[in-house]
Amino acid sequence: MRRQFRTAAAGAALVLTGALCGCAAGASAAPLPAAAERAPASPAAVVADAVQRVAAARFGGLYTGEILTDHGRKVVVYLTRLDKTAEAAMTAGVAPGIVSFARAPRPLAWLNRLHQRVTGQQPALKRAGINLVTWGPDFITGRENLTVQDLTAAKAAVLDRLFGTGNLTLTSTTARTSGCGCAMIPIHPGTTLPAQPPPEP
């Protein structure tokens, strides 16, 4: 079966978070604004931070990440399976209707490990003619998103062999400059920047 590749569109809407970033040699991430310059956290963002703390401490095998929806007013938490005990712990003291739960394929720790493997292999891949322009995990799909300069079936085969068939979403681009690989999550209507996932212990 012939494999189909996506082509990166200019201005594609992606959310970038900093907790899972790995930069190519010579690339640098934009610095975070000073605390005084940052917009105050919305009530839902405060809830998302609290959910993260509980999830990281008690439910690392279930927790994948979360996004803010409804223009920052609600939180969707992604777990590898729905679990009443975990849901109750994460929403303790939270007003009803703010937090909802959805399923995602893989836990954050697994995505972290895959992302670090890709980041570690990026220089060697570039020397071999496979230039990763951007790369980063998407916890909703449970895959690493890779944007590759002039992607071909042969390059895709190498990447699948290195990182596992079904673990990657590949997109082709004509861009040449490699940047930071960060967590990339498609923006859906009403979705705002997700709270940053905690780093793997």
Image (cartoon, rainbow, N blue to C red):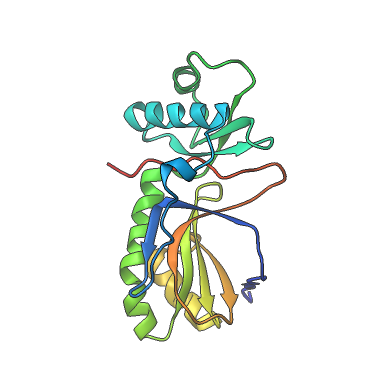
Residue in front for this viewpoint, 14 or 131: 14
Toward which corner of the image does residue 73 lie, by quadrant?
top right
Q: Residue furthest right?
A: 189
On screen, residue 124 versus residue 192, left or right, reads: left
Instruction: Return the residue found at the far front.
Output: 36
Which image quadrant is residue 181 in? Answer: bottom left
In this view, the residue farthest toward the top is 93
Q: Where is the N terminus found, in terms of image quarters?
A: bottom right
**Residue 53 image position (x, y, % from top left):** 38, 29
In the depicted structure, whether residue 8 falls above or below residue 55: below
Left/right placement of residue 48 relative to residue 128 reads right
Q: Residue at x 48, y 37 (%)?
A: 80
Q: For residue 49, which quarter of the picture? A: top left
User: Residue 5: image x %, image y %?
Assistant: 62, 73
The one nearer the camera, 140 or 14, is: 14
Q: Is residue 54 above or below residue 157?
A: above
At 49% from the left and 43% from the top, the residue drawn is 38
Between residues 115 and 74, which one lies in front from this camera angle? Answer: 74
Q: Position of residue 92 (x, y in %)?
A: 48, 15
Q: Residue at x 70, y 41 (%)?
A: 190
> Residue 24: percent from the left, percent from the top?
37, 71
